[in-house]
């Protein structure tokens, strides 16, 4: 039996009329697209001081909604819906991708369900309230508090303000993901969990609902033909395993997916849903990370999932899916989707194309037992909806002690909240590493990750070296313009200092795009210098509102990188230069005589890389990555073993006639270029300090080669 592949992002004309926004079926990972009805489009909208139409699924603050009102706290959506007459005899389910923050749903005035939590998907069985072929009024009453501090809201702005308000953005309130109806069997699989971490088969758990879940017969069939028949227990849960005779593993290089058809019941009234997963195992071994038994190094980028006109909602499927293509083009093999449950459509595309994902929930900003409970309440829905995705290799929880008042070390209750969230998530899913508090102050984690922003590249180089050597455990963190604290990697004295993989999961500096690209080049090479680290996550993928830290602007257009190619800095094989650069556009002064720079090779491929480091001067500003010039100099042969920095080789460089760019590359034994770097040589003037107060900026020499 072969099941047809899903076609993510393709609208279904019979389910969504022409012109419907976000018309595509939203769950290709859990496919019921044979019988569904898209409810996006124009709804009636009534709010405090406002009445008129709104376009679903866009938040009422967004331009795309047609409302564009901020700080509304209460609103009601209404529209007429008619389930297709041919659904008679089936059960009808009303599904919401996400509604921020609390939703009360009525049909013809009768409450059919309530949901609290602005990021989780949820659904209601409306069979008894919505007769097929009969129009009914669907109403969604929404409460989205302006004061978000005690609820999960991530980087949506709050009034009163969050402590981290400087990196917060316009809220995304109300219905902000697709709303749709589905027809299902009289007894149906409400959820299907697939796990392939055994690498030899797929473990299946189906939770049934509807008329008669207890004792129902369930057949799960993989697209390879193997199947298993199960009987649900008294709670309507059916568990079993599909053994795969010739398993094909999922990896970034070979992202093979299995589609599993789950059939509940028999005959014409049977329920059918097709879920997708992959066979893969992601694990820690000592301080290293392994995928399917092979060591892997994470080269990640932080993505906040915002768009200028639509907020947290992607404007269309093409824009959503293109973000993964763009991240891959920048050289990344992982995306950290920051403080947001991204749409299943995006996760399915990550599965399909082999992008690794670090997924995490939104957090509150202030600590209380109630806020901690609200944070944890998101976790079952996160795992239930997204746990089948092989692309998700890391679960995150809190970020930088947001929701813990920046005070794990000083508060046993806050430390316990982080540890308890870890334990709760581990109960729900034991197949992935978990980070309980990204950035610092770790109390219970599978990855020791750290965030560090440092504008001085000399200090960055030294601090990274000390952290790698275990000689330093803390680093300064600027929590505000007048507030700097020293944060430790460890939240408790007894946390193990060795044996846990270390990953930098936020870094990047500079005000202009040129400066940021310059910092990307040099900061990334220092992370690659140290074999102890298991990966990194650069901040960030694209600009968001006032936060202009992206490699791309908010519309996903490349910025001016000053000739840098991010994919070179993020490649499997990179060059690491023993040099502290001077400034963006002037890594070194113009050399009037030959000089020598030591070069290492960092290589993360499956086999050793060898070759010679070569270089040539080209005119200043020459694009990197164009045709390789004739080498003017070359090193002795160098060999880099996988995941071990090579010994240094000396590269003697001739003088330059004036400002110029030195292209540097590693050519393998067959002459192919497998790594690139460059140095800009230009005049470097001391900073203009005219008018400075007496005593300021004195005695600060310019850095040089060393």
Image: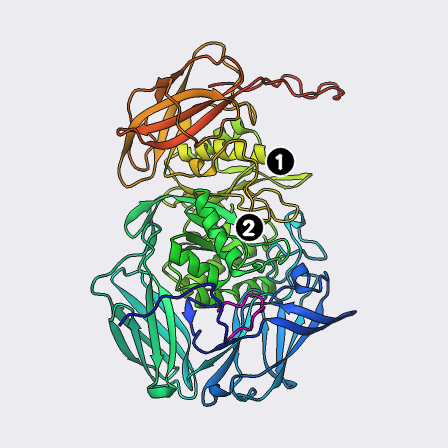
* Mark 1 crowdedness (10 Å alpha carbons): few <14, some 14-19, many ≥20: few
Question: Is 82 in the magenta?
Answer: no
Magenta part, dominant SS: loop
Q: Nearer the viewer, residue 176 or 462?
A: 176
**N-terminal label among 2 and 1:** 2
- Quadrant occupied by the N terminus: bottom left
Q: Return the x and y of residue 397 as percentages of the image width and height.
A: 50, 56
Q: Is residue 486 left or right of residue 379?
A: right
Q: Return the x and y of residue 597 as percentages of the image width and height.
A: 41, 19
Q: Nearer the viewer, residue 669 or 391?
A: 669
Q: Return the x and y of residue 167 as percentages of the image width and height.
A: 63, 48
Q: Which residues are magenta?
A: 15-25
**What is the quadrant of residue 147 in the picture?**
bottom right
- Which residue position is annotated with label 2? 408
Q: Is residue 537 left or right of residue 199?
A: right
Q: Is residue 342 left or right of residue 349?
A: right
> Does 19 appear above or below 696?
below
Circle on res. 511: 1
- Count all numbered tags in the image, as a single digit: 2
């Amino acid at each position: 039996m072969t099941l047809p592949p899903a076609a993510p992002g393709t609208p279904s004309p019979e389910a969504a009329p022409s012109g419907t926004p976000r018309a595509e079926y939203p769950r290709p990972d859990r496919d019921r697209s044979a019988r569904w009805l898209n409810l996006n489009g124009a709804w009636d909208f009534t709010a405090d001081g406002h009445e008129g139409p709104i376009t679903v699924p866009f938040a009422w603050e967004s331009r795309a909604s047609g409302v564009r009102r901020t700080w509304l706290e209460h609103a009601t959506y209404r529209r007429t819906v008619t389930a297709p007459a041919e659904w008679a005899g089936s059960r009808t389910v009303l599904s919401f991708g996400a509604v921020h923050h609390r939703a009360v749903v009525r049909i013809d005035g009768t409450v059919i369900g309530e949901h609290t939590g602005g990021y989780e998907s949820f659904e209601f069985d409306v069979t008894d309230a919505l007769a097929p072929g009969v129009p009914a009024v669907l109403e969604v009453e929404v409460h989205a508090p302006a004061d978000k501090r005690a609820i999960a809201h991530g980087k949506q702005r709050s009034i009163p303000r969050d402590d981290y308000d400087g990196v917060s953005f316009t809220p995304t309130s109300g219905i902000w993901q697709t709303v749709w109806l589905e027809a299902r069997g009289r007894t149906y699989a409400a959820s299907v969990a697939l796990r392939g971490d055994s690498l030899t088969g797929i473990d299946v758990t189906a939770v049934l609902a509807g008329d008669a879940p207890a004792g129902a017969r369930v057949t799960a069939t993989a697209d390879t033909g193997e199947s298993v028949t199960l009987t649900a227990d008294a709670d309507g849960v059916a568990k079993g395993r599909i053994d795969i005779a010739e398993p094909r593993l999922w990896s970034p290089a070979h992202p093979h997916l299995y589609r599993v058809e789950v059939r509940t019941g028999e005959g014409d009234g049977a329920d059918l849903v097709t879920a997708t997963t992959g066979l893969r195992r992601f694990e820690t071994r000592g301080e290293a990370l392994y995928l399917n038994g092979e060591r892997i190094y994470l080269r990640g980028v932080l993505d906040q999932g915002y768009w200028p006109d639509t907020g947290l909602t992607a404007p269309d499927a093409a824009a959503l899916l293109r973000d993964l293509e763009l991240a891959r083009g920048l050289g990344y093999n992982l995306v950290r989707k920051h403080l947001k449950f991204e749409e299943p459509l995006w996760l399915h595309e990550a599965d399909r194309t082999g992008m690794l994902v670090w997924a995490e929930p939104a957090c509150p900003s202030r600590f209380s037992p109630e806020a901690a409970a609200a944070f944890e309440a998101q976790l079952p829905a996160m795992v239930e909806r997204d746990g089948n995705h092989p692309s998700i290799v890391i679960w995150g929880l809190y970020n930088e002690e947001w929701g813990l008042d920046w005070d794990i070390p000083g508060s046993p209750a806050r430390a316990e909240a982080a540890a308890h969230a870890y334990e709760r998530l581990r109960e729900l899913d034991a197949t992935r590493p978990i980070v309980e508090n990204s950035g610092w102050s770790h109390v219970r984690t599978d990855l020791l990750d750290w965030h560090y922003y440092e504008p001085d590249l000399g200090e960055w180089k030294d601090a990274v070296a000390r952290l790698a050597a275990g000689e330093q455990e803390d680093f300064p963190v600027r929590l505000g313009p007048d507030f700097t604290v020293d944060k430790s990697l460890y939240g408790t004295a007894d946390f193990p200092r060795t044996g846990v993989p270390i990953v930098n999961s936020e870094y990047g500096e500079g005000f202009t795009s040129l400066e940021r690209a310059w910092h990307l080049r040099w900061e990334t090479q220092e992370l690659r210098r140290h074999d102890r680290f298991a990966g990194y996550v650069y901040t960030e993928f694209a600009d968001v509102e006032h936060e202009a830290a992206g490699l791309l602007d908010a519309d996903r257009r490349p910025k001016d990188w000053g000739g840098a190619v991010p994919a070179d800095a993020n490649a499997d094989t990179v060059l690491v230069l023993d040099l502290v650069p001077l400034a963006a556009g002037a890594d070194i002064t113009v050399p009037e005589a030959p000089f020598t720079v030591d070069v290492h090779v960092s290589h993360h491929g499956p086999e050793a890389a060898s070759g010679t480091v070569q270089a040539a001067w080209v005119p200043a500003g020459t694009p990197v990555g164009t045709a390789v010039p004739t080498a003017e100099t070359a090193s002795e042969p160098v060999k880099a073993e996988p995941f071990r920095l090579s010994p240094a080789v000396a590269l003697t460089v001739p003088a330059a006639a004036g400002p110029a760019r030195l292209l540097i590359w590693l050519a393998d034994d067959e002459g192919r270029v497998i790594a690139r770097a460059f140095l800009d040589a230009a005049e470097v003037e001391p900073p203009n300090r005219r008018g400075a107060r007496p005593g300021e900026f004195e005695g600060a020499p310019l850095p040089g080669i060393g």
